[in-house]
Image (cartoon, rainbow, N blue to C red):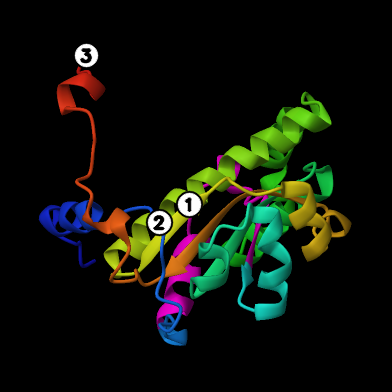
Amino acid sequence: MHPVSPDTVLAQLQWRYATKKFDATRKIAPELWAKLEQATVLSPSSFGLQLWKFVVVTNPEVRQKLHPVSWNQPQILDASHLVVFAAKNPPKATDVERHIARIAEVRGVELTSLDPLKDRILGTVSRMTEKDAHNWAARQCYIALGVFLSTCALAGVDACPMEGFQPEKYDEILGLKAKGYGSVVIATAGYRHPDDPAAKLPKARFALNDVIEHV
């Protein structure tokens, strides 16, 4: 274990901001991007179910199609990478069974030994409406988004979380609905343009005493 110092973490989180203007000439190196993908996959989720798919869009033609349904925001075209965080829509019993099978495979245990866990998860999912189940899965995507943004900051990569897009259009263009997913939130990543005015703005956060309460 090689922990990153708290001062380094804080320094990088101070450095990051929601990048508004990316340098379109700079791309994230493939080996670095692979690490960012691995970090995102390691994100925690409820029951560890991972009811998500992370669609990495680098194809310029696809990005051109997504641009107008993202309110023509320049990050869609100029960032090195675009990530669409999509959630199962809705989660099903087969998703639970797939998760349980993966646990058994990775941990080398009998599938039947995981029946109590499977039944508990299935019980939780069965009590939800399809809409509630999708919303539950969607909330997990925001956990992954947070991990992605923090990892980017620690790696010196700029990123911008974005909700300004039309999910149904993204689902259509990317074929997500047919795969049983619905887009939830997106993030662009790359390197800030030297002229991005947002980079020079002081980070405005409430004082610790206003946000954190000790009981």
Q: How crowded is mark 1: few (under 14 residues within 10 Å), some or many (20 or more)?
A: some
Q: Position of residue 150 (x, y in %)?
A: 35, 56
Q: Position of residue 82 (x, y in %)?
A: 56, 67
| Amino acid type shown at disc 1 | Pro
Q: Give the quarter of the figure containing the N terminus.
A: bottom left
| Amino acid type shown at disc 2 | Leu
Q: Please state which of the two labelled residues, at mark 1 or mark 3, is closer to the viewer.
A: 1
Instruction: Farthest residue to the right: give it.
Output: 178
Q: Residues within 10 Å of mark 2 (few under 14, many from 20)?
A: many
Numbered circle sitting on residue 149: 2
Q: Position of residue 110 (x, y in %)?
A: 69, 57
Q: Position of residue 83 (x, y in %)?
A: 57, 63
Q: Is mark 1 on a helix, strand or loop?
A: strand
In which quadrant of the rendered view does residue 212 lie? top left
Total labels drawn: 3
Q: Do the residues labelled 2 and 1 touch (CB within 8 Å)?
A: yes
Q: Does the magenta stretch include residue 53?
A: yes
**Which label's residue is closer to the chain start, 2 or 1?**
2
**Which label's residue is closer to the chain start, 2 or 3?**
2
Residue placed most toward the observer, 159 or 110:
159
Q: Give the quarter of the figure containing the C terminus.
A: top left
Q: Residue at x 45, y 67 (%)?
A: 189
5 up-or-down from 82: above or below: above
Q: How crowded is mark 3: few (under 14 residues within 10 Å), some or many (20 or more)?
A: few
Residue placed most toward the observer, 138 or 188:
188
Question: On the image, numbered disc 3 is attached to which residue?
Answer: 215
Numbered circle sitting on residue 161: 1
| Amino acid type shown at disc 3 | Val
Q: How far apart are marks 1 and 3 (CA)?
A: 32 Å
Q: Horizontally, is 131 left or right of 160 in the view?
A: right
Range covered by the magenta-colored residues? 32-55
Residue placed most toward the observer, 5 or 26:
26
